[in-house]
Amino acid sequence: MNKILLLAICVFFNVSAFSQIIYEEFNSSKLGESRKLKIQLPRNYDSNKDKVYPIVIVLDGDYLFEPVAGNVDYFSYWEDMPESIVVGIMQGDSRYEDCAYDDNTFMPDEDSAKFFEFIGLELLPYIDGKYRTAKFVIGVGHDFTANFLNYYLFKDPPLFNGYIVLSPDLAPMIDDRIAQRLPSISQKVFYYLATGTDDIKGLMESTEALNTKLVGLKSQTFNYYYDNFENATHYSLVGRGIPNALEKIFSVYRPISKKEYSDVVMKLNTPIHQYLIDKYATIEDLFGLDNPIRVNDYIATATASEKKKQWESLREIASMAQKDYPNTILGDYYMGRYYEENGDPKKAMRTYQAAFDKEEVDFLTIDMLLDRADKIKTDFGY
């Protein structure tokens, strides 16, 4: 809660000083006109030539872009989500034509069908072609544009991997259609829905009705999250919903926290090193990101392996750390611990001593390694 309160105070302050904001005019053949775009690139985009980034498409970019971009920058700074490219579509008064639906079918009408195709057939291919993108795309919308996001669920496969749907002004029948459609989608879908107790009454009621239909869906590919914020209005719920949505959608991406360590890792009945491998395989599978395992996660799982006396897991973790961080003492320390506990003190001593000229990591210091080596030498007379 304190983190969210801090975020509310500072996240919108001078975002452009930390990340690259680009303003563009995009000429659309589908729309027969140009549209203004706001694009935020990650802080170190130019220096990380091999890195790829998920995309966040923001409808109602006139007022939603800044809160979304600020939160993305803040969360990615603390590694609670991957750095991402944020694309805001300026709509202004055209939002109603862009996102209208037919009075009979309640699906996109002639004008909104053009806007539908503009995003899927023009804008996203343009962003993919110009920037280094990962194959994970989130859409964000509010009221009228939030409803419009739902139409992309009916593409096969759906255009977006994640949907942040804030107080949607739902079209008739769309709730039933979504509930029927979702179980048949084979790819992973993350769907976040939010309203507030002081939201516009009709929107709050229809959002609650949609939640009732979605919360009970049984699907291994559908990841659903819902918030009804106490005392939040139609507009203030946006500021609370965006960080909650990002935090939940990217929960698996975050470094292992104290809670994950105590509630999950320490309660595993399976090898701890496999949990670490599976965590990063999931990150790659979901978000298209081949990230190295973080130092934090090596330390967390190695510590758990020691406490649970899973010495083979400790050996595997140490071996992986030696490969990922060969210039640090990280892997050598835990490999030495493995040798100690596995009855090979001489090999442990030599492993500690061999790392004396490497870089220290977190609480692991050269003095710690040499002290352990000296203790073994004293105890065994080597």
Image: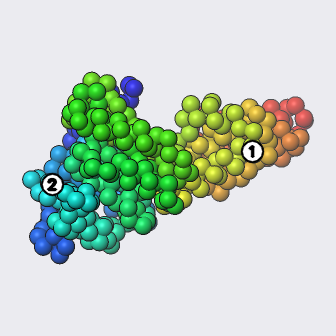
Q: Position of residue 240 (x, y in %)?
A: 31, 34
Q: Earlier in the sequence, mark 2 or mark 1?
A: 2
Residue tagged 1:
271
**Residue 372 visible here:** no
Could you say whether the residue bearing mark 1 is in a helix, strand or loop? loop
Q: Residue at x 26, y 50 (%)?
A: 171
Coloration mode: rainbow
Residue found at the far front of this picture: 104
Q: Position of residue 75 (x, y in %)?
A: 38, 42
**Residue 202 visible here:** yes
Report the quarter where the C terminus lies.
Answer: top right
Q: Give the label on residue 95, or none.
A: 2
Amino acid type of the residue that numbered disc 1 sits on in the rendered structure: Pro
Label 2 crowd (10 A; few <14 / some 14-19 / many >=20): some
Q: Is residue 363 above or below residue 59?
A: above
Could you say whether the residue bearing mark 2 is in a helix, strand or loop? helix
Q: Is residue 167 left or right of residue 348?
A: left
Task: State the image quarter where residue 28 is shown.
Answer: bottom left
